[in-house]
């Protein structure tokens, strides 16, 4: 029997007892009428239903369907302040384009190894001396011969020679020119200057009659005119070491490369390099 009908029955008995107490009849309680309570209807018993298992679904729940529950506290996530360090903007450097290296295809040919059956002696190279150069004209001196041939046969003409403190002067009549050769290394090493002397002119100058240097003299005639007029030549070549110039038969010949060869009175040869850059003297080699 349920709890609710029992509660109602007790409540009804209490009410009846209270009513009988208020009556004045002292003879005791008296049954007026029997009340029969109808049987109470049984209330249905509450039965707990099993909790259904959650159904798993692949459906993505929309953020709008998420409920927010009120809480007794507020969770505040601190946000770091922005950094004051400036961000460096990357600089894009151009990538140099490399020139492609041409590919070289090497084809290797397999060769069967040869095994010698005897010792091979090394072959000694035979050097064949080249034939001597044949020139249309011969050099007027014996040695040393230039590598090239002369452009023309040697010419012999009237000439004059004189030695100075620091060089030489040679006069070639057909050219009417004076060759000046310096012993120092200043450029130019040699020069070709015009002979301005004419017959009947004064051959020397009394102002240079006495030299300040012993055993030196002023040059005469064509050499003297050039020496006195050209201060640069005089200061560089110095005074003559011979009191007189020496006339002789001078031989002149030119090589194909422009080198000029001049003979002197004692069998020597002057070799004048093209461009006035240098000159050399070879003694006792003239063949004429």
Image (cartoon, rainbow, N blue to C red):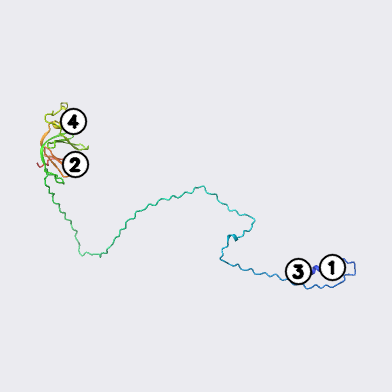
Mark 3 residue crowding within 10 angstroms, few (<14) / some (14–19) / many (20+): few
- Is the residue under label 2 in contact with that under label 1 (CB below 8 Å)? no
Residue 277, located in which quarter of the rendered image? top left
Q: Which residue is mark 3?
A: 4
Q: Is residue 285 left or right of residue 79?
A: left
Q: Which residue is mark 1?
A: 17
Residue 169 rendering spot, x and y as whole percentages = 15, 35
Q: Which residue is mark 4?
A: 229
Mark 4 residue crowding within 10 angstroms, few (<14) / some (14–19) / many (20+): few
Residue 167 rendering spot, x and y as whole percentages = 17, 35
Q: Which residue is mark 2?
A: 274
Which residue is depicted at the point 84% across and 68% down? 17
Distance (Cα) linking label 4 and label 1: 179 Å
Residue 265 rendering spot, x and y as whole percentages = 11, 37
Distance (Cα) linking label 1 and label 3: 21 Å
* Sequence-wise first label, 1 or 2: 1
Q: Which of label 4 and label 1 is nearer to you?
A: 4
Residue 108 is labelled as none
Q: Is residue 268 left or right of residue 34?
A: left
């Amino acid at each position: 029997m349920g709890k609710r009908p029992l509660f109602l029955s007790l409540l009804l008995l209490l009410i009846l007892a209270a009513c009988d107490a208020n009556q004045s009849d002292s003879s005791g309680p008296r049954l007026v009428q029997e009340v029969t309570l109808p049987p109470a209807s049984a209330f249905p018993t509450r039965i707990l239903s099993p909790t259904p298992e959650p159904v798993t679904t692949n459906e993505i729940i929309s953020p709008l369907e998420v409920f927010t529950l009120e809480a007794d506290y507020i969770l505040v996530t601190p946000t770091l302040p922005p950094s004051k360090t400036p961000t460096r903007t990357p600089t894009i450097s151009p990538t140099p384009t490399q020139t492609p290296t041409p590919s070289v295809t090497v084809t290797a040919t397999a060769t069967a190894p040869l095994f010698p059956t005897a010792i091979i002696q090394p072959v000694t190279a035979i050097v064949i001396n080249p034939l001597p150069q044949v020139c249309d004209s011969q050099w007027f001196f014996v040695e040393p011969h230039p590598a090239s041939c002369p452009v023309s046969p040697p010419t012999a003409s009237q000439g004059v020679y004189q030695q100075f403190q620091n060089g030489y002067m040679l006069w070639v009549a057909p050219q009417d020119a004076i060759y000046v050769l310096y012993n120092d290394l200043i450029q130019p090493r040699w020069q070709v200057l015009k002979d301005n002397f004419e017959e009947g002119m004064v051959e020397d100058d009394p102002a240079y009659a006495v030299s300040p240097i012993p055993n030196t003299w002023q040059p005469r005639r064509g050499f003297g005119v050039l020496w006195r007029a050209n201060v640069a030549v005089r200061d560089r070549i110095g005074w003559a070491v011979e009191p007189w110039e020496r006339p002789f038969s001078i031989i002149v010949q030119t090589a194909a490369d422009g080198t000029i060869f001049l003979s002197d009175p004692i069998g020597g040869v002057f070799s004048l390099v093209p461009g006035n850059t240098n000159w050399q003297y070879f003694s006792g080699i003239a063949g004429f």
